[in-house]
Amino acid sequence: MPNRLAQETSPYLLQHKDNPIDWWPWCDEAWELASRHGKPVFLSVGYSSCHWCHVMAHETFEDAEVAIALNRDFVCIKLDREERPDIDEVYMTAVQISSGQGGWPMSLFLTPDKKPFFAGTYFPREARGEFPGFLTIVGSLAKAWKEQRADVQKAADEFGTAISAAMERTLPTDLHRLDVGVLDQAVELLHQDFDDENGGFGTKPKFPPHAGLRFLLDYATMRPEMGGDFGDLPERAGHMALFTLEKMALGGIHDHVGGGFHRYSTDDRWLLPHFEKMLYDNAQLIGAYTHGAKVATEPRLQELFTRVARRAIDWAGREMLGEDGTFFSALDADSEGREGAHYLWTKADLIEVGESEEFLGAFQICGEGNFHDEATGKLTGENVLDLLVDHGSGFDGELARLLEARNERERPGRDHKAIAAWNGMMISSLSQAGYNEMAIGCAETWANQTVKLLPHMVTDTVASGEAFLDDLALMADGFLDILELTGDSRWKDLAFQLVEHAVQNHGDNDRGFFYVSKQSERLFGRSKPFLDNATPSPNGVMARVLRRLGRPTEALAVVRAGLGWVQRVPRATETLLREILWHLWENESEANFTERESTRLVVTLEPREITVDDDGWGYAEVVMSIPADVHINSNEPLAKWLSPTSVSIEGVFGEASFPESKEGIYCNEARIALRLRPKSGSSKFEVTVRYQACTESECLMPQETSLTGVLIVP
């Protein structure tokens, strides 16, 4: 009998409507039930095209014994991470804190006040290899909740504090000037991680490096015009991007038969894909291949990249385009009950279709197969089409015949949500590739939605969900590309409308943008997304949109807010690096940042001349006058990544006594008591105070102030 998910519209939730588990969607009623009965919550998060989500569903969630245990001791909630990326982000932070890595499906056990006390990803029903058994986990956690609830709640409270600290974290920067050196250093670091043999960065698994490709392509063409000493860095940047694009185009991650790209490669040479096809990957790769064709000087690469982009667009128009002109989200990895069944071929299959020996040789087809099962590593007897060199359009007829044969197979499931952010990327890439009618048609549908208020998604023509920062930024970026295409100022007005909504509801003055609006549901605070993931940094895209709208000061303020991340993790901030490149290219070779007046503290020593008392000690105070909209960390801040206030004394013996702070911060004024004793006679001394100033949304680089005084012996 179907459970509560039968009434939902999410394809992922509907996949679980017949589970014996009494699933709830994410809703107030589920949490009220948990509170009323004092039950913990099991939260399972995934998405419709996720292969390992399907594995766990079949192994675990369809099992009667698992269902009995979960239904008895937990309130069970299913969440589509694409419908609620804000909630997904919160609990992915918990998984990463717990295990150091993340992924889907996510499996979390929560208190009725939504705090996790156990977090992980995929679990088989019974223990296998490095994976503990889910049934054992459920039993152990249910017992702990009943018998050691105070300990479980304490652990959950600590977990909640850690999530809040991680989500609200901003990294300080000591950069007060932007120059091309920041960009050159980033390219050097990327080159250190570059795979010279296979393209891409690092080893397996390999994901298409979307933001990195666009940054490197722009750097290769723009850096030589900016002067200074850059050596061969532009050539290296261009090679890294173009070589990676070529290797991905040849590999099995590229669907040679139908066009478009699979999610990622489980090996290091792009051969063995996870077979789901995501709109966000293909939208970005269409843009990258279109731009790569313009940057490449070799005719063979120009032709290859143009063909790859065109065939990806043909795939999207054939399989992902809705009747209203918007694009669906994803195609499933699985069909016929297993991953990749739609895309894999035995040699006999291909011979039966009529493919030639030349074709079989070119695409690396062999009798034992070239596809390895991910879990066992064993060959399956099936093949992924994979090229060592490009054959141009020489096999177009054979590939068309193969597509016709493949269309007779069971098709992978399609997630029919149209998500604003991903459609915004598609609008941009289509307009840049010259597919004007398709780009404008999609943009017009979303423009009609924007008149009311841009939704997060549209499902079966029904709009739902409040737009998140990436929705607003990427759709505005798409509208500006349509503006360049048509010259119609209406598109600039629409982009301006989206940006103003973001400024009013997501903005933090000149300190970047929050992912969710000030009206949104909040679990553990609001994050500011500066990092690139599978999709580009929402703050980085917003900086681009502000620049394109002729608001460079605001754009530069967003970049400045993310500079701490740029300094520490350049491999995850290429969208921001690309904006730095564009700002310096359009304006000048460097840009200065002025220190915010509001963050300046006044630190004094009172008194500076200190008379030693009869007990042999002199007494003074370090007085820190703190602006109204700023606080500093105490000597024992609550989060480990925060820099504590500290005092060091040179020239005399001394010790400092810090004021207490339960919140781990000092506001308005902090007085640090000093007790000083001369080493010999009257002595000059120096007190160095180190501290970190923070606003509600960011912490600046730690600073220090040195104060001098005299200790007088009567």
Image (cartoon, rainbow, N blue to C red):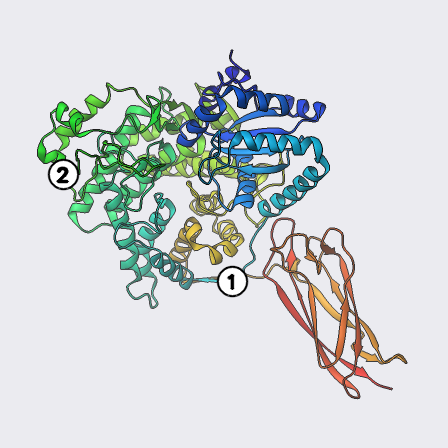
Q: Is residue 353 left or right of residue 5?
A: left
- Secondary structure beneath dot 2 equals helix
Q: Quadrant of residue 22?
A: top right
The residue lying toward the viewer, choosing from 652 and 623, is 652
The picture places residue 369, in percent across and down from the top left corner, at: 21, 34
Q: Label 1 belongs to which residue?
A: 175
Residue 113 visible from this viewpoint: no
Residue 285 lies, in percent from the top left, at 32, 40
Alpha carbons under labels 1 and 2: distance apart: 52 Å
Q: Residue furthest top?
A: 1
* Label 1, residues with CA under 10 Å away: few <14, some 14-19, many ≥20: some
Q: Badge 2, how many Cα within 10 Å: few under 14, some, many 20+? A: some
Q: Count of labels shown? A: 2
> Which-is-in-front pick, marks 1 and 2?
2
Q: Nearer the viewer, residue 313 or 365?
A: 365
For the C terminus, the quadrant is bottom right
Q: Amino acid at mark 2?
A: Ala
Q: Nearer the viewer, residue 225 or 526?
A: 526
| Up-down relation of residue 211 to residue 616 (above or below) | above
Residue 330, x across and y down, in percent: 38, 28
- Describe the element under mark 1 as helix, strand or loop: loop
Residue, x 33% and y 48% (percent of image)?
213
Report the residue that reaches farthest toward the left: 357
Q: Which residue is mark 2?
A: 362
Comes first in the chain, label 1 or label 2: 1
Residue toward you, 198 or 558 = 198
Q: Quadrant of residue 435?
A: top left
Residue sitting at 59 percent across and 37 percent down? Answer: 118
> Is residue 468 depicted above or below 688 in this figure?
above
Question: Where, by quadrant of the figure, is residue 535 drawn?
Answer: top left
Q: Residue furthest bottom?
A: 681
